[in-house]
Image: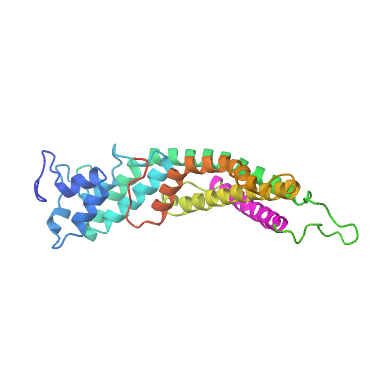
Amino acid sequence: MTILDRDSEGNNIVLLSVKNRHTELFELLFNRKPRDQSAFNAIDAKRNNVLHVAATLGDCQPYPFAALQMHWEIKWFRYVKQSVPRGFFVSRNDKNKTPKEVFMITHEDLVTEGGKWLKETSNYCSVVATLITTVAFATTANIPGGMKEDSCRPNLERHPSFIVFAISSLIALAFSITSTVAFLSILTSRYHQKDFRRDLPRKLLWALTSLFISLAAMLVCFCAAHFVLVKDEFEHSGYPVIYAMACLPVAYFAMMQFPFYFALVLQTFKRVPQRTPFG
């Protein structure tokens, strides 16, 4: 199939690449020198131009999460929009619809599903973040090693483990509060179509990043406090094994969430929409 050949529905290779969400193929055709602009200006049998096709929500949806899929669709539509003449923005198909109107109609259900998914995710994660905040705040009243009676200063204030404990507990408290606020801001959002372009994905990314940092900091805090209490009970060679085992829950959680988190980071900051690592 050459770039100008068409199928029975009037689709050429450019329209098919947009319809099937083959981002790499479309980008290759767009950056091809010399570019055949007539292929990008083509319309199918239903008078849909390439922007109408990009605006239509099809069966090919790379992301299993509705909110990320909506974000992907917006970026894809805007990217394809840059490859066509401005006259295509107001062009109407055989149903008298512009590309923007097609996009709004075909993505209504996806917006609803995306808002529901974000609310559920934010609810669950905000509970975890609040729990970490509570625990991190409680550690300030239970300082390992106790306090000096004459000066009300920690007995182990110059001990390296105590310094790690103090810094990590502060990091856990600060980032868990930040995560809670970020998730609450998602819960109070309007969930309009335009919010899925930049506002909601970045709030979600910041909230999850803060949550992961607070989890890691809380684990370091507990390990440091434990080391202060049992430093004279174990051989130094046993510490790495003990604390490596203590890190397994967070490591397991990170491995389970890494594909989703990686996809969110990639999709948020990439100008050209990329297919998700989910497959």
x and y percent of residue 119 in the render?
52, 40
- Left or right for 272, reference 2: right
Quadrant of image for the N terminus: top left
167 in the magenta segment: yes
x and y percent of residue 134 in the render?
70, 45
When asked about the image quadrant of residue 105, the answer is top left
- Left or right for 20, reference 237: left
- Left or right for 140, reference 150: left
17 in the magenta segment: no
Q: How many marks?
A: 0
Q: Main secondary structure of the magenta part?
A: helix
Q: How is the image coloured?
A: rainbow
- Left or right for 144, reference 43: right
Instruction: State the residue in front, 25 or 238.
Output: 238
When asked about the image quadrant of residue 160, the answer is bottom right
Quadrant of image for the C terminus: top left
Q: Identify which residue is drawn at 55% across, 45% down.
A: 187
Q: Identify which residue is drawn at 74% across, 46% down.
A: 230
Q: Identify which residue is drawn at 29% across, 47% down.
A: 55
x and y percent of residue 184 in the render?
59, 47
Instruction: State the residue in front, 152 or 80.
Output: 152
Instruction: State the residue in front, 66 or 274.
Output: 274
Residue 278, visible in the rendered structure: yes
x and y percent of residue 130 in the render?
65, 44
Residue 93, visible in the rendered structure: no
Instruction: State the residue in front, 13 or 225.
Output: 225
Give the residues in magenta.
Answer: 161-187
Residue extending farthest right: 150
